[in-house]
Image: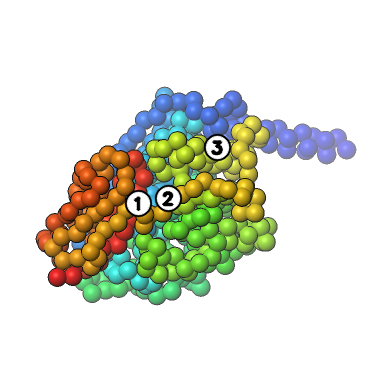
Amino acid sequence: MKRVLLLVAFIAMVGVNFTSAQCIGGNRYKTPLFGYDSVMNIKYGQNVTATSSLVQDLKLDIYLPANDTFQKRPLVFFTHGGSFVTGTKADGDVVYLCKEFAKRGYVCVSQDYRIGMEEFNTQSAARAVWRAMQDARAAIRFMKANAATYKIDTNMIIYGGSSAGGFTALHAAFLDQPNEVLPLIDTSEYTGVGSTGLGNFRGTTNNLPNSSDGIKAVVNLCGAIGDTAWIQAKDKNVVVINMHGTADKTVPYGTAVIKLLNIIPLLEVDGSYSIHKHLDKNRHENYFYTYCGTDHVPYAGLTVTHKAWMDTTIRFVSKYLYEKVLKCGNSDIIVRSVVDSNDCPITGINTELIAESFKLYPNPSNNEVTLEHNFNGPSECSIYNVNGQKVASIRLKENTNKVEISGLADGMYVVKLVHNSQTYLQKLIIHK
């Protein structure tokens, strides 16, 4: 009996010491306690671009709690969106999240990944997701290799992202078996001009020896996965945090065909609600919040409503990272958990239709296109080709603007308008 009591006491002591090592008490990981430092434009690898043999350097930014003496901090990625054709690691929503979580004691990363599609079709969309997944895994390997420099706990890696970054997070965490290869993916090695090979799950963005496995949790903000069946019993150690809007017209709340610019059908995907139902059915630990009545990424912007949704996002993610991933006990963070569209009030937040806010005509165009919007004040506009390369930048000073496009080649483009940090996208076809 004495031996049993001694064993119980020993186990209890080990448990207390382990908890103390990861969870030091106080408000760390719950509320902002620090300023933040940043280390910018660190090259973590390189790889060929979406449509050429040209090599692209891939970089990331690191945000750290300032004047922090803790030696092993959790690592959180917040990866940008942009439909895999636009976006950078400097996008406002992911930078804000990185700064806020660094202030709470996490080491945070915003990374670039290869964007662009060979064409706007199913195969090119699948290939874009594959490249992003490979680059995410390369960034994880890089951070593991530099864990001592940035004081990272390599057993506590959390990968999150917004929109396409949410896609990237889910596929980096769960796509790892031969039978899960996305349709139309050539997993042979890239051999040069004309090669369609993308390489295997690991990719060749860097050749660091560290494993990119071991993601402890996924934070999926308005993203989706190609098939919930890819989240299997072997993956149950990965906690999943999903947040998604019921009126999302860019990435489906449930299961549907995703359309680029709400026009071009690409892939059938399972959105956050479908993921949540699949995980619940299989008793896989997950936490889900429904943004009632909202369109895509409702936290991305500078209006009062955007800021309110960003506050909700930070509180929800903070709560479940603290309580269920770090396992530091009750966080006392109050946020109402909305897990189903049926839990939403009858009237939600009204969202503005992109088609009514931003128009361009004629479309197709040849030498000149008219860009029209109904916002007050100037807006920034950029035009991207199918490789994700910015080919034109325009400052729109009026509500109706004529833009010269005679210097652009025939083809399909994405026109991106930014006003008050909110992004609007339209497709443009140039045909002369």
- The residue drawn where x is 56% and y is 41% is 316
Which residue is at the front of the view, 430 or 26? 430
Q: Where does label 1 land, which residue?
A: 357
Amino acid type, residue under disc 1 in the picture: Ser
From the viewer's perspective, tell me whether residue 106 is left or right of residue 386: right
Earlier in the chain: of badge 1 and badge 2, it is 2
From the viewer's perspective, tell me whether residue 306 is left or right of residue 375: right
Distance between mark 1 and mark 3 Cα atoms: 31 Å
Distance between mark 2 and mark 3 Cα atoms: 26 Å
Earlier in the chain: of badge 1 and badge 3, it is 3
Q: Where does label 3 land, which residue?
A: 315
Amino acid type, residue under disc 3 in the picture: Arg
Earlier in the chain: of badge 2 and badge 3, it is 3
Dot 1: element:
helix
Which residue is at the front of the view, 275 or 201? 275
Give the image location of residue 203, x and y in percent.
37, 62
From the viewer's perspective, tell me whether residue 235 is left or right of residue 40: right
Q: Is residue 155 above or below residue 212?
A: above
Give the image location of residue 224, x and y in percent.
49, 59
Contact, CB < 8 Å: mark 1 with mark 2? yes
Q: Where does label 2 land, which residue?
A: 352
Q: Give neighbour class at mark 1: few <14, some 14-19, many 20+ (Cα, 10 Å).
A: few
Q: Give neighbour class at mark 3: few <14, some 14-19, many 20+ (Cα, 10 Å).
A: some
Q: Quadrant of the N terminus?
A: top right
- The residue drawn where x is 45% and y is 58% is 249
Contact, CB < 8 Å: mark 1 with mark 3? no
- The residue drawn where x is 53% and y is 58% is 253
Give the image location of residue 125, x and y in percent.
37, 67
Amino acid type, residue under disc 2 in the picture: Glu
* Numbered label attached to residue 312: none
